[in-house]
Amino acid sequence: MDLELGPLKPEPVELIVGLACFFLMIWLLGRKVLPRIERVQAERRDATEGRLERAEELNAEADRTYEAYRKVLADARHEAALIRQEAAEQGAALIAAAREEGLRERDRLVSEAHAQISVDQALAAVTLRHDVGELAVELAGRVVGESVSAVAAERATVARFFDEH
């Protein structure tokens, strides 16, 4: 055995073959394996960052949609309040108009009723005078014992009596 050779002094052929294998492995790793590893890592990074970017885009879109929804909702509430106010004003105007029409109708009916009462009162007075006159003439005829209707009609006694009183 050669003492000069050992773990610290390898054989030159083994050293050259080992170095050649080592450099061949480094070259293969650098040309084939490492680019694949880097490509897979890049794809994963892009997928992760892409998902994050898409999530941020979706979140921003959701925020824009939410703000648009809130604006539309606020506009709808404002419009509903305007419609309610307009309806209340129209209702108050309709009530006032109906009240006015009711008051006019009431006044018209009261006027017609007063006129009808006046006419009925005059007719009743005329009818009452006539009936009272006939009864008075008939009663006077019974008291006297003979008919006084011809004398009363000729002298217009009953009409004169009512005119005086």
Image: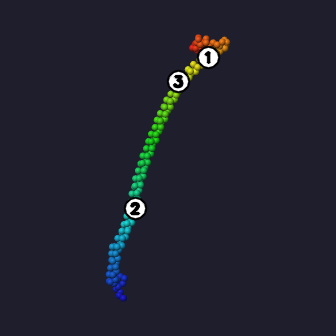
Residue 51 tag number: 2
Residue hosting label 1:
134
Report, in whole angstroms, how far the alpha carbon at label 1 lies from the one at label 3.
29 Å
The coloring applied to the image is rainbow
Residue type at numbered disc 2: Arg
Give the mark nearest the N terminus, 1 or 2: 2
Residue 24 falls in image quadrant: bottom left
Label 3's element? helix
| The C terminus: image quadrant | top right
Nearest-to-viewer mark from 1 and 2: 1
Dot 3: within a 10 Å radius of its alpha carbon, few (fewer than 14), some, or many (20 or more) residues? Answer: few
Residue 35's x, y, as percent?
35, 70
Nearest-to-viewer mark from 2 and 3: 3
Dot 1: within a 10 Å radius of its alpha carbon, few (fewer than 14), some, or many (20 or more) residues? Answer: some
Q: Nearer the viewer, residue 127 or 48?
A: 127
At 39% from the left and 64% from the top, the residue drawn is 47
Label 2's element? helix
Give the mark nearest the N terminus, 1 or 3: 3
Report, in whole angstroms, how far the alpha carbon at label 2 lies from the one at label 3.
93 Å
One can see residue 163 in this view:
yes
Q: Nearer the viewer, residue 79 or 135?
A: 135
Residue hosting label 3:
115
Residue type at numbered disc 1: Glu
Report, in whole angstroms, how far the alpha carbon at label 1 lies from the one at label 2.
119 Å
